[in-house]
Amino acid sequence: MQRRGLRIVRWSYAQIAARAFQFARELEARGIGHGDRVLFWSENSPEWIAAFFGCLLRGVIVVPLDLKSAPDFVDRVQQQVSAKLLLTDEVQLPLDRHSAAPYAATQIKPDDLVEIVFTSGTTAEPKGVCLTHRNLLANLEPIEKEFRKYARWERLVHPLRFLCLLPLSHVFGQMMGIFIPQIVGGEVHFLESFKPSEIVDTAKKQRINAVVTVPRVLETLREKILHDYPNVARDLDTAEHRHFLRNWWTFRRIHRRFGWRLWAFISGGATLEAEVETFWHRLGYAVIQGYGMTETASLTSVSHPFRIVRGSIGKPVGGQELKLNENGEILVRGDSVSPGYWRGDVQPIADEQGWIHTGDIGEVGPNGHIFFRGRSKDTIVTAAGMKIYPSDLESVLDQQPEIKASAVIPFNETEAMAVLIPGDATADLNAAVARANESLAEFQRIRHWTIWPEPDFPRTPGTRKIIKTQLAEVPPQSVVVPSISNLDSLGRVELLSALEDQYQIELDEAAFTEATTVEELEQLVRKGQTDGVAYPYPSWAMRFPTTWIRALVYHLFLLPLTRIMCSVRTHGVERLKNVNGPALLISNHVTDVDAALILSALPFRWRVRLAIAMSGEHLREWRSHDKLTYALGAALFNVFPLPRQSGFRKSFAYAGEAIDRGFSVLIFPEGHETKDGRIQPFKNGIGLLTSDLNVPVIPIKLDGLFELKKRRQYFVRPGTVSVTFGEPVQFRASQTPEEITRELEARVKNL
């Protein structure tokens, strides 16, 4: 399952297989076969997985790239692998022209390459790790064997649901997003956002069992829990030696927040701090850690879910050998070790005895458990597990004319900081760093830099290598962010979402809307989580028995009352017959009874499956001071809040949830009632909502109502007011929200 815009896309294993067969036939039609390469440069999706298996059926080598990879990096990868096809989110192949019947796989050998995985965005010479069928199966077979011991117990909680927050371009992401769920017959949910609130909401709504992520996300989730539940920190001090069931009961509010089915976090890609692991353990969750690298097909060791040793990265996966050399460096040997790096062919990676030197320092504890102690390489590993090679960043910085010399060192352990020597006193180093960032992948970009006060860096006497340990003494500066004063409302929404995803924080939309300067924006980001405006979202109104009660009460009492007061004349209602699924209904806004009149004009199947947007401010006021009115409005009319000023992103998400549940959505795009009887300009948000929902839009126009409003006439002759339904319209993905807004406005006016 994957969220696309405001909707959730669901694919079964049968659909994945059928699409894979079609993709294999598409490759065959293009003459792409055994040993050829295909570039994958797109986000996680069911189509990504289907294409992956389609390549395997043809013996084609997959070259997965991170979606955030810089175009220049992709070009240099292409120069190495000479791929015959590039897959992106923008390009759609004509797969429907092919049969979905099972495809006879090409003869595959264990040592044939499955994929070439290029290390995280190196800007010097990209280094591709070759992985074979033997490599991947060496890690999967021991896991499948161990799972069989617990298969009968899994039936009690079947299906296991995984929330995968890792990219499929990484082998660990493939393990947890493709292979292991198939072994256990589980579901996989992909989520592109790292926002804590979205992760928590998804875990609860989708009844997730295990969240697969990197340590940085666990840290931000921890910060959110501490922010939302201040008393938790006090209770944690007494939870260390208590039974986990008692802790589970003590922190039941948190378990209710995540959903009762969630029991584990699976962490990999970077080092998990002991404090973070202890936090989640005391709350009553299992924290499963794994260790590995791309060169060992992601897994070298993994914690057993039911025999976890705190602080340990587990025991070696069955069939692998692990030892420490005299310096404590971890060495690995086994079938999971890559045959080598790609240089037009495969160049060996292991030493003469078959050992691969990981560059990581470890310690072997009692019963063979491994403990990670640090890294020996000059590599910065981000909190998301991405590797930053200082030499790559330095080569880009040194190309800038304003910079005489550069050195990159760790900042807060997981970020890169550039120490710069300017070419002259007038050099604009901020512009130079910003220019260098344009050619770097997003995770590589330099956000902190400082000026070295001497003409040269401190160096060793013999080799003249820079002594980087002395460079961290000068305080860093930050790269200047462009002005936001000229952004329109849609631009601000995009910027707000980008900031929340980048820094994994919650920002108050009202405060963000008021920010006009970069300084104010920085203060909001530094403050981190803010208490947003709380609007009620009554999802219970879309569930049984409320849906049945609403249909009964409406047709017995409310519909007859509406027709007694104002029986409307309808036009174009036959246009709704060809709309099979849910739709977005939009109408001009005249009075506060518009929704009731439209409801009375709709056919039965539309009336009982409709969610109505109303003023978020009014609905919040009802919830706070008139709970009975709020409950009746939500229960009898299925209303939800659409704020006029801020907070509408959650409303859009709720509209997407309603569509996914099979409800159509009614919205008044003007945002307020007309003052003179004429249709007012539509808000741009309706274009954004339409684009993200990707459902047919039905324009509606109310006529004859404004005159009654002016006379304050409540009982009218039948047919005085008319409701006209326009032709349903579906918009192209290429149309902008502004274009959609203007077209919808014109369609309603022309009815």
Image: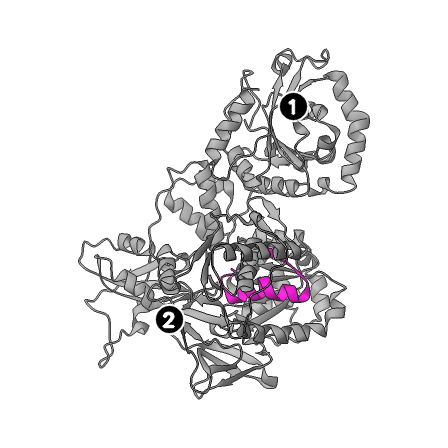
How many numbered marks appear?
Answer: 2
| Kind of element beneath mark 2 | loop
User: Would you place residue 684 above or below residue 197 in this image?
Assistant: above
Residue 177's mark?
none
User: Which class describes the residues within 10 Å of circle 1: few (<14), some (14-19), or many (20+)?
Assistant: some
Q: Return the x and y of residue 503 as percentages of the image width and height.
A: 47, 54
Give left or right: position of 19 versus 464: right
Q: Return the x and y of residue 733 as percentages of the image width and height.
A: 50, 40
User: Would you place residue 245 above or below residue 657 in this image?
Assistant: below
Q: Return the x and y of residue 564 as percentages of the image width and height.
A: 77, 17
Residue at image x 43%, y 41%? Answer: 515
Query: What's the CA distance linking mark 1 and mark 2?
Result: 68 Å
Q: Are marks 1 and 2 in contact (CB under 8 Å)?
A: no
Most extreme residue toward the bottom is 326
Residue 519 visible in the current orientation: yes
Q: Quadrant of residue 226?
A: bottom right
Check residue 187 for magenta coloring. Answer: yes
| Image quadrant in which the C terminus is located | top right
Q: Amino acid at mark 1?
A: Asp
Q: Return the x and y of residue 419 as percentages of the image width and height.
A: 29, 64
Q: Earlier in the sequence, mark 1 or mark 2?
A: 2
Check residue 650 for magenta coloring. Answer: no
Residue at image x 65%, y 43%? Answer: 660
The magenta segment: 167-190
Q: Amino acid at mark 2?
A: Arg
Q: Which residue is mark 1?
A: 594
Q: Quadrant of residue 460?
A: bottom left
504 vs 33, nearest the viewer:
33
608 vs 185, nearest the viewer:
185
Q: Which residue is mark 2?
A: 343
Residue 446 visible in the current orientation: no
